[in-house]
Image (spheres, grey):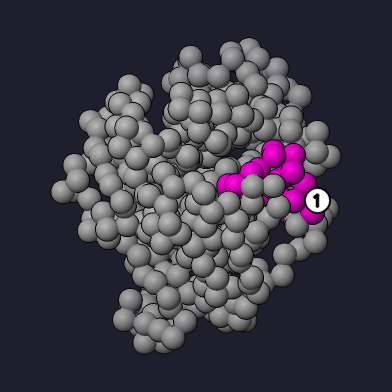
Amino acid sequence: MAENIVILSPHFPPHYHRFWLQVKQAGGRALGIGDTPEEGIAPEVRASLSEYRSVSDLHDDEALVRACGWYTYRFGKIERFESLNEYWLETEARIREDFNIPGPRPAEIERVRRKSRMKEIFRAAGLPTAPGRRVGSLEEARAFAAEAGFPLIAKPDAGVGARNAHRIESEAGLATLFTAQPNEEWFLEAFVAGELHSFDGLADREGRPLFTAAHVFSQGILETVREGRDLFYYSLREIPAGLEEAGLRSVSAFAVRERFFHIEFFHTADGSWVPLEINLRPPGGWTTDMFNYSADADIYRAWAELLVRGETTLPYRRLYHSGYCSRRRSRRYAHTHNDVISRYGHHILQVETVPPVLSGPLGDSGYLFRSPSLEQLQDIARFIQQPAG
């Protein structure tokens, strides 16, 4: 039994306190380390933790080591070190190595941190991938563009998610990219046209999926942020066979153990499922709540029991399509919030104010809702996002 679970940055995202509370209820200690003074943490977050220590800077590994040392002195060996946040993957890995804590170490993180390495693993698993190359100079970038053509997608090779991603339309765009960030090592990839899907879930200690789900997105996150679009995405009650096969093959290829996974695929016109990237964390936003709403499950409990007790049970059936719709303050909509609640209140499950740091992809506010009918779910989304005039 793993009693001592240290949680890095437990106050963000705010709703993740549901994970930490379940650690306590499973019989473990949820020991937080954050950069916010204890009195500045939301009451529900503090109540979910067994103990909390603040440091001035979470990027200061020495401060983190001291905080972990204190917890070791007070409670004994630290058995897990987690944040469930992609931003802290490297920090988690270093602390695990320092304290000999189970979980991915720095060498393993390279598989999901470097886009070039990620593509190699997808390809070795027999999955179709778009042409891509790591480039360190404008000359190398131009050579790749001559082979692959425009448009191209450029991301830092050592990066997380879609942060600092760019769509490059021409050689002039490449020149601008390297002028603005001349010391960055980029991963360039041919643009893939297709509908964006994700294959998501939680794997047990042996790598067996305990829970799986699939989601369809109105457009890619890059387009959502760059063009300031509203986002709508929803879960499927039945996972397409090709997506499930590609997703499970990816989970195996990346040796996912005792972790969430979020794998993005483009479904192309020829029926292929082309992997974009894999993230070893829960999918973003309130998707973990959507997991629960779609199947009347409790993914928070299952994750905590898996870490603390080493096993869990999570029987589920996908009874509903669950959806997320964003709105932006800069846009005018045909229907007010009261209109939405009046018409579809029996389907609306949560209405969230989005933290500013997440508003690029998720809007300024968001609605979570569900229905057994996909047609009805899409009707609700159209009503929420219908523009004024």
For image coordinates 32% across by 21% down, the residue present is: 62
Q: Residue at x 41, y 61 (%)?
A: 25
Q: Image check: 10 left or right of 377?
A: left
Q: In which quadrant is the C terminus drawn?
A: bottom left
Is residue 251 located in the magenta-colored stretch of the structure? Answer: yes
* Quarter occupied by residue 327: bottom left
Percent position (x, y) of residue 260?
57, 50
Q: How many marks?
A: 1
Can you give x and y, in whole percent of width and height, for residue 352 in the image? 35, 65
Q: Is residue 165 visible?
A: no
Kindly state the secondary structure of the residue where label 1 is placed.
Answer: loop
Q: Residues within 10 Å of mark 1 (few under 14, many from 20)?
A: some
Point out the stretch of residues depicted in magenta: 245-267
**Front residue of 69 and 158:** 69
As displayed, is residue 263 above or below residue 170? Answer: below
Q: Nearer the viewer, residue 338 or 345?
A: 345
Q: Position of residue 156 (x, y in %)?
A: 54, 27
Q: Is residue 295 magenta?
A: no
Q: Position of residue 305 (x, y in %)?
A: 52, 57
Dot 1 amino acid type:
Ser
When the figure is inspected, residue 150 is found, relative to residue 381, above or below; the finding is: above
Q: Does 263 appear above or below 35?
A: below
Q: Residue beneath label 1, please?
A: 272
Q: Which one is nearer the viewer's eye here, 160 or 26?
A: 26
Quadrant of the rendered structure where residue 109 is? top right
Q: Which residue sits at x=60%, y=56%?
A: 311
Lateral position of residue 329 relative to residue 83, left or right? left
The residue located at (65%, 59%) in the rendering is 210
Q: Quadrant of residue 350?
A: bottom left
